[in-house]
Amino acid sequence: MFLTQGEVYHVFNRGNNKQPIFFTPENYLYFLSKLDRYVTPCCDLLAWCLMPNHFHLLIHANTNSTIVIKDGSFERQQFSQGIKQLLSSYTKAINKQEKRTGSLFQQKTKAICTDRKDHALTAFHYIHQNPLRAGLVKKMEEWPHSSYQEYLGSRKSICNKALVTELLALDPSRFYEDSYKVINFNTGDFD
């Protein structure tokens, strides 16, 4: 995965064979703490959603994201290194908890550049709509494992909400209404 500074990316991955990656409510919180530790220092997090067998992030690549670092004989960008550390440390903990071995996630985390402002805004809303579309909740605000509640102001935010307003032209006064508009968004097989 190679990011370009200043671009917005929809980042996602899922469990091997579409298997669950979260087994308890505490697992979601643990993943989120690892996300905050390893990923938010190397990007601007705009939105996130953790689903039973996959996750979605919307990030803005900043100067920290694109710094190239050496990891053994490999060179990778700081953001890629952060994702690697997130998935590796989370997998290690889940393998111990579940008494399992091997990979928890698919090999490649995908990062799709949302090269237009309207596409980035669509991805933003799609990420929050994910639990609703999957039939896990009747209202988006019922799903505790996404940044939706951060944008409603009912939880401390790890997202750069000011940057979302600027980059995506999000109107905070219309956030709730706009979130429920029907949005067509092609995500391949993550629906």
Image (cartoon, rainbow, N blue to C red):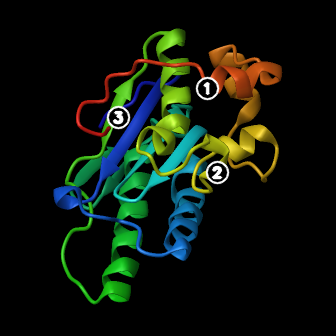
Camera-side residue: 31 or 132? 132
Q: Earlier in the sequence, mark 1 or mark 3?
A: 3
What residue is disc 3 on?
Answer: 111
Q: Which of labels 1 and 3 is toward the front?
A: 1
| Marker disc for residue 142 | 2
**Picture quadrant of residue 46:** top right
Residue located at (77% from left, 19% from top): 174
Residue located at (60% from left, 57% from top): 36
Residue located at (55% from left, 33% from top): 63
Amino acid type at circle 2 is: Glu
In the image, residue 41 sits, relative to residue 110, either above or below, namely below
Q: Which of labels 3 and 2 is toward the front?
A: 2
| Residue 147 point in image, percent of width and height | 63, 45
What residue is disc 1 on?
Answer: 180
Tell me if mark 3 has few (under 14), some (14-19) or many (20+) residues whose alpha carbon lies within 10 angstroms of its own: some
Camera-side residue: 75 or 106? 106
Q: Earlier in the sequence, mark 2 or mark 1?
A: 2
In the image, residue 87 sits, relative to residue 117, either above or below, namely below
Q: CA distance from mark 3 to mark 2?
A: 27 Å
| Residue 166 point in image, percent of width and height | 72, 18
Camera-side residue: 97 or 83? 97
Q: Are marks 2 and 1 in contact (CB under 8 Å)?
A: no
